[in-house]
Image (tube, rainbow, N blue to C red):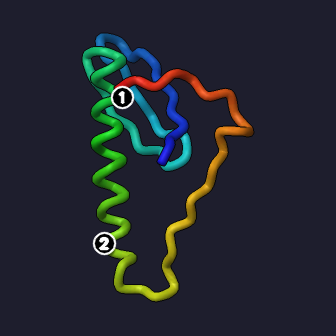
Amino acid sequence: MKAIIHVSRDGRYFVAEDLITGVADQGSTRREAISNLRKGLEERYEILMDLASGSRKTVCLDIEVGRHAKIASSVS
């Protein structure tokens, strides 16, 4: 899964926000903020999948949007 994020500086901290879900996290460095956001998004989707697993009407949809957007380099 890919996320579309925005990273900004807010005083001493960097803030990384997923533009689709609105989930955000911060860190002392840009890399730390992105890493923290990644963990938060993973937890969010794990919880959502657990909640949805009991419903037969819920399915996962894999959408590829990379061909429509210029993809920035990722940070691990």
Other-residue count near label 1 (Cα within 10 Å), few / some / many at <14 / 14–19 / ≥20 = many
Left or right side of 34 for 5? right
Q: Where is residue 19 in the image (x, y as percent from the top left)?
A: 54, 40
Q: Where is residue 6 in the image (x, y as percent from the top left)?
A: 51, 28
Q: Mark 2 points at which residue?
A: 50
Left or right side of 37 for 66? right
Q: Where is residue 66 in the image (x, y as percent from the top left)?
A: 65, 39
Identity of the residue drawn at 51% across and 21% down? 73
**Mark 2 and mark 1: Cα distance apart in space:** 24 Å
Q: Mark 1 points at which residue?
A: 34
Identity of the residue drawn at 28% across and 53% down? 43
Q: Relative to 41, is 17 above or below?
A: above
Which residue, as the protein is rendered here, is positioned at the far top?
12
Quarter of the image where one finds residue 45: bottom left
The amino acid pointed to by label 2 is Asp
Q: Is mark 2 on a helix, strand or loop?
A: helix
The amino acid pointed to by label 1 is Ile
Q: Relative to 71, is 29 above or below?
A: above
Q: Where is residue 8 in the image (x, y as percent from the top left)?
A: 46, 19
Quarter of the image where one finds residue 63: bottom right
Left or right side of 19 for 44? left
Residue 16 vs residue 45, the one in the foreground: 45
Residue 18 vs residue 63, the one in the foreground: 63
Other-residue count near label 2 (Cα within 10 Å), few / some / many at <14 / 14–19 / ≥20 = few
Q: What element carries label 1?
A: helix
Cβ atoms at labels 2 and 1 below 8 Å apart: no
The disc at residue 22 is none
Question: How many numbered marks have been drawn onto this rendered protein structure?
Answer: 2
Q: Which of marks 2 and 1 is nearer the N terminus?
A: 1
Identity of the residue drawn at 25% across and 16% down? 28
Which quadrant of the figure contains the C terminus?
A: top left
Left or right side of 59 for 30? left
